[in-house]
Amino acid sequence: HVQLVESGGGSVQAGGSLRLSCTAPGFTGVRCAMDWYRQPAGKVRERVASISLDGTTTYADSVKGRFFISKAKDKATVYLEKGSLKPEDTATYFCKQFCLGWKPGQYWGQGTQVTVSS
């Protein structure tokens, strides 16, 4: 049974940084593709960063140069380093993962709130 656990959210002032983590405990020796999404209150969820099975990364234009996605080798763990935060980055952040060998489907974290004050 796959459960994704997120951590690292919180409140920060504009210009600050945060690191989010998302892991599926107990899975080692896996190859995974991961994404981070965010959903501001009252708005649609948007993808902000992705990392593929082979480690290729892509970013939404709004976060390029400020956010960096990475993953732990052979583990179902993904990180999102967020720097130069802006008030418009305030949102609930969700991770999504799929690892080879998992049952087909979408696996999401529970979400973690990030609030950036000006």
Image (cartoon, rainbow, N blue to C red):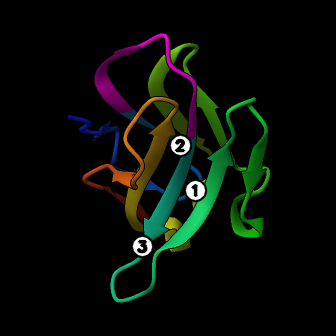
Q: Are marks 3 and 1 in contact (CB under 8 Å)?
A: no
Please state the extent of the stretch shown in magenta in the rendering.
23-33
Mark 1 neighbour density, 10 Å: few (under 14) some (14–19) many (20 or more): many
Q: Where is residue 109 in the image (x, y as percent from the top left)?
A: 31, 49
Question: Residue 68 sits in which quadrant?
Answer: top right
Which amino acid lies under the numbered mark 3 shown in the image of this protein? Gln
Which amino acid lies under the numbered mark 1 shown in the image of this protein? Leu
Give the distance between the C-alpha atoms of the residues marked 3 and 1, in whole angstroms.
16 Å
Q: Do the residues labelled 2 and 1 touch (CB within 8 Å)?
A: yes
Residue furthest toward the left? 1
Q: Is residue 9 above or below residue 45?
A: above
Q: Where is residue 105 in the image (x, y as percent from the top left)?
A: 39, 54
- Name the residue that disc number 2 marks: 17
Give the distance between the C-alpha atoms of the residues marked 2 and 1, in whole angstroms.
6 Å
Q: Is mark 1 on a helix, strand or loop?
A: loop
- Name the residue that disc number 1 marks: 85
Q: Which of pointers 3 and 1 lies earlier in the amino acid sequence? A: 3
Q: Which of pointers 2 and 3 lies earlier in the amino acid sequence? A: 2
Q: Nearer the viewer, residue 34 or 89?
A: 34
Which residue appears at 50% of the width and 61% of the height?
A: 37
Q: Can residue 26 be seen in this view?
A: yes
In magenta stretch: residue 75: no
Residue 39's tag is 3
